[in-house]
Image (cartoon, grey):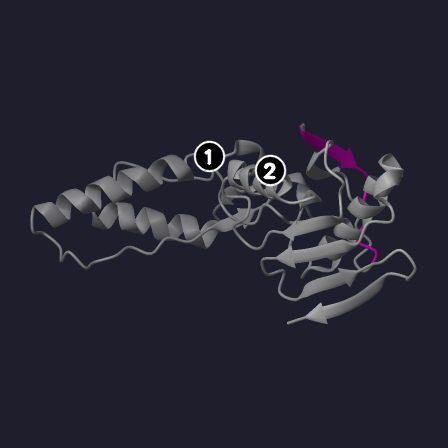
């Protein structure tokens, strides 16, 4: 029978910057408990992997159904670096003062000067700008190729920030350590890591009679 489980654990702090981590590390596993399992496979999601978590679940379950492996997704540090349809994994759009001034200028230029943007209504204003610009294009008031550039900061949830893959790599190691502690029968299985880009992907291999080997793949 296919088994899906989610775990939340303590992971690493940012030792380099002296920042204590305040959130739990989440990882999910899928495996068939009726199979003779041959390996643990870690799917490393790159930028944008958080866009739709159901895609990750589908891929993990598909591999577990069709191969004799335990499949793991780690929601590593700064995993939520792109917009997501899942609110829990969706970063906030927070404009700075320059962004707000720019948008207010745009509102005046497209005859929406009665509106005023701030940090609280920024996301609600964007569709209004898009709608107005489309109306102006349809009316022939501006060229069809005309574009408006908007900018803002993406703030990941859980107090995360870009760490260039260092903490993300350690998160995978900690997830593996927790997994084999929960399931001792998995401890001697070969470990396979692969997937998207974490700037540089840490590649880990492990066999029953060897120590953990780490290498970098550009």
Q: Nearer the viewer, residue 60 or 188?
A: 188
Residue 57 appears at what percent x and percent y?
58, 37
Residue 17 appears at what percent x and percent y?
79, 58
Q: Nearer the viewer, residue 48 or 131?
A: 48
Circle 1 packing at 10 Å, graded few (<14), some (14-19), many (20+), is few
The residue that appears at 13% across and 58% down in the rendered structure is 143
Residue that mark 1 sits on: 120
- Residue bounds of the magenta highlight: 2-15
Which structural element holds mark 1?
Answer: loop
The part of the image, by quadrant, that contains residue 116 is top left
The residue that appears at 62% across and 40% down in the rendered structure is 157
Residue 134 appears at what percent x and percent y?
18, 45
The part of the image, by quadrant, that contains residue 112 is top left
Residue that mark 2 sits on: 61
The residue that appears at 37% across and 53% down in the rendered structure is 150
Q: Indicate yes or no whether the magenta region holds residue 174.
A: no
- Does residue 12 show up? no
Answer yes or no: do the residues labelled 2 and 1 have beta carbons within 8 Å? no
- Does residue 139 show up? yes
């Amino acid at each position: 029978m296919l088994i899906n489980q989610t775990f939340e654990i303590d992971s690493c702090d940012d030792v380099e910057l002296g920042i204590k981590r305040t959130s739990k590390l989440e990882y999910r596993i899928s495996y068939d408990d009726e199979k003779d399992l041959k390996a643990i496979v870690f799917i490393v999601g790159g930028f944008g992997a958080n866009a739709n978590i159901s895609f990750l679940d589908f891929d993990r379950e598909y591999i577990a159904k069709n191969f004799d492996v335990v499949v793991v997704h780690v929601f590593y540090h700064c995993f939520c670096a792109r917009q997501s349809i899942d609110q829990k994994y969706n970063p906030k759009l927070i404009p700075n003062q320059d962004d707000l001034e720019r948008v207010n200028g745009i509102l005046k230029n497209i005859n929406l000067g009665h509106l005023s943007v701030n940090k609280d209504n920024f996301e609600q204003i964007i569709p209004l700008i898009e709608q107005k610009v489309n109306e102006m294009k349809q009316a022939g008031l501006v060229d069809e190729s005309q574009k408006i550039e908007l900018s803002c900061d993406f703030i990941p949830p859980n107090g995360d920030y870009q760490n260039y893959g260092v903490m993300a790599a350690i998160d995978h190691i900690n997830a593996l350590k927790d997994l084999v502690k929960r399931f001792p029968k998995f401890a001697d299985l070969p470990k396979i890591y692969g997937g998207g880009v974490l700037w540089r992907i840490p590649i880990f291999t492990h066999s029953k009679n060897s120590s953990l080997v780490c290498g970098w793949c550009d």
